[in-house]
Image (tube, rainbow, N blue to C red):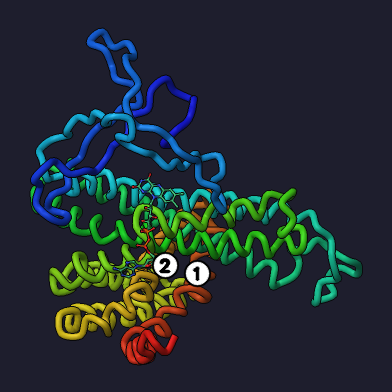
Amino acid sequence: YGEHDMAENIVHLVLARVQGAPEGVKGISLFVVPKFMVNADGSLGARNDVHCVSIEHKMGIKASPTAVLQYGDHGGAIGYLVGQENRGLEYMFIMMNAARYAVGMQGIAVAERAYQKAVQYAKDRVQSRPVDGSINASAAIIHHPDVKRMLMTMRAYTEGCRAMASVAAAAYDAAHHHPDADTRKVNAAFYEFMVPLVKGYSTEMSLEVTSLGVQVHGGMGFIEETGAAQYYRDAKILTIYEGTTAIQANDLVGRKTARDGGQTAKGIAAQIEQTEAALLASGTDTAAVVAKRLKAARHAFLDVVDFVAGNTKASPNAVFAGSVPYLMLAGNVVAGWQLARSLLVAQDLLAQGQDEAFMRSKISTARFYADHLLSKAPGLRDSIVEGADSVTALAPEAF
Ligand SMILES: Cc1cc2nc3c(=O)[nH]c(=O)nc-3n(C[C@H](O)[C@H](O)[C@H](O)COP(=O)(O)OP(=O)(O)OC[C@H]3O[C@@H](n4cnc5c(N)ncnc54)[C@H](O)[C@@H]3O)c2cc1C
């Protein structure tokens, strides 16, 4: 939104250097640069020297005017220092962390919309007879097992990521407002660990979900008129801005895992283990299956945490070759864990006779996530712990 006519004035937050600032990121300050200067009485004053020289043509999010801005070509733009000189990057990260969480939510939102549209289409589009002969004529495609698999994948990913983001938000609140200092500290560490997962995992999953949304629509999905393709195009930017998935993964490896020797990650694994015990104690077959998958995924996660914590300094290439897969594994495990927790709640409420159809859907979705998505975790562990050599084997000249 660098340039538009929806508001009288536009305020740009700009990173720049003051004269004589130290080299590199230590010399970056933050400024407010308005499009129009503001008079003492609040009215708009002179035009500032910041001009939009073009609006980008993009793959998606076409209603958002991403602008190329030119500063100071006509004598110099006036900017107001925010806070202290040379602390701009630090200030930017306050906004950046909130933005990373928000972009994760964008991923979940676009995934939900793609899912709703796909469900609607799958109930409407008639094509082929069901394989089980249950309908002796062409039926709505939602009767085909593979269409259901796609819809369940979309639903499980979206619900899992939404639950993960909600738990992260609650931890953020507790980190700021809980009366007990130790509880605030634990929640702060948990939230910090969650930010790259909410951003990285939810946005990568939104790409898969919106792609499946196109696939459910078949040929019509590729035709712009249905609108399914727009979600796919819109979702792609989410894995890029506010730090690409690899940048989130670098954060997860360096600041969130290696720095504390994997302690926060292991604390999360200990909580997951408690959920496994609760699942087993609940006594249902479904809960037992989910507990089994969750346990396998937790072990895979712990193996990778040990690998990352133990090797980041000594063998950085080996660890960072698997940094994005580690992010995907961690996001997968946390989202699957949250759906396992929701299964426990749904089982209890079902036993109390509450909203049977909704509770059964929750239980089925958690089971699907465990069977089809959590089950990928051990494979990812193998790729990360044993696969680094083949990532880095080729020299740049060999490409
Ligand atoms: C539509 C749109 C809107 C934007 N809005 C804003 C905005 O409002 N404000 C703003 O400041 N910026 C904005 N950006 C910029 C955006 O944040 C960056 O494009 C993004 O962070 C990626 O940085 P880059 O383009 O420099 O990619 P690069 O850093 O060049 O990345 C290229 C590739 O290399 C990888 N890579 C780079 N470094 C590493 C590393 N250390 N480890 C592993 N892999 C690495 C990346 O993951 C990526 O795959 C916007 C961009 C777009 C497209």
Residue 396 is left or right of residue 210, and the answer is left
Mark 1 surroundings: few (<14), some (14-19) or many (≥20) residues within 10 A: many
50 over 379 or under it: above or below: above
Q: Which one is earlier in the sequence, the residue at label 1 or at label 2?
A: 2
Location of residue 321 with respect to 129 vertically, above or below: below
Q: Which residue sits at x=20%, y=54%? A: 187
> What label sits on residue 369 in the rendered view?
1
Q: Secondary structure at mark 1?
A: helix
Does residue 249 appear to the left or right of 213 in the view shown?
left
Q: Residues within 10 Å of mark 2 (few under 14, many from 20)?
A: many
**In which quadrant of the rendered view does residue 124 lie?**
bottom right
226 relative position to 367: left or right:
right
Residue 274 position by quadrant: bottom left
Q: Nearer the viewer, residue 292 or 395?
A: 395
Q: Quadrant of ligand 1?
A: bottom left
Q: Position of residue 56 (x, y in %)?
A: 50, 46
Tell me which amino acid carries mark 1.
Answer: Tyr
Q: Determine which residue is flagged by label 2.
A: 336
Q: Examine the image and state in which quarter residue 374 appears.
A: bottom left
* Disc 1 and disc 2 in contact, CB within 8 angstroms: yes
Residue 204 visible in image: yes
Disc 1: residue Cβ within 8 A of ligand 1's nearest atom: no
Q: Nearer the viewer, residue 23 or 80?
A: 23
Furthest toward the top, the residue is 41
Say whether residue 360 is visible: no
Residue at 19% over, 83% down? 311
Identity, as a three-letter code, of the amino acid under mark 2: Gly
The front one of 343 and 333 is: 333
Q: Is residue 94 above or below residue 197?
A: above
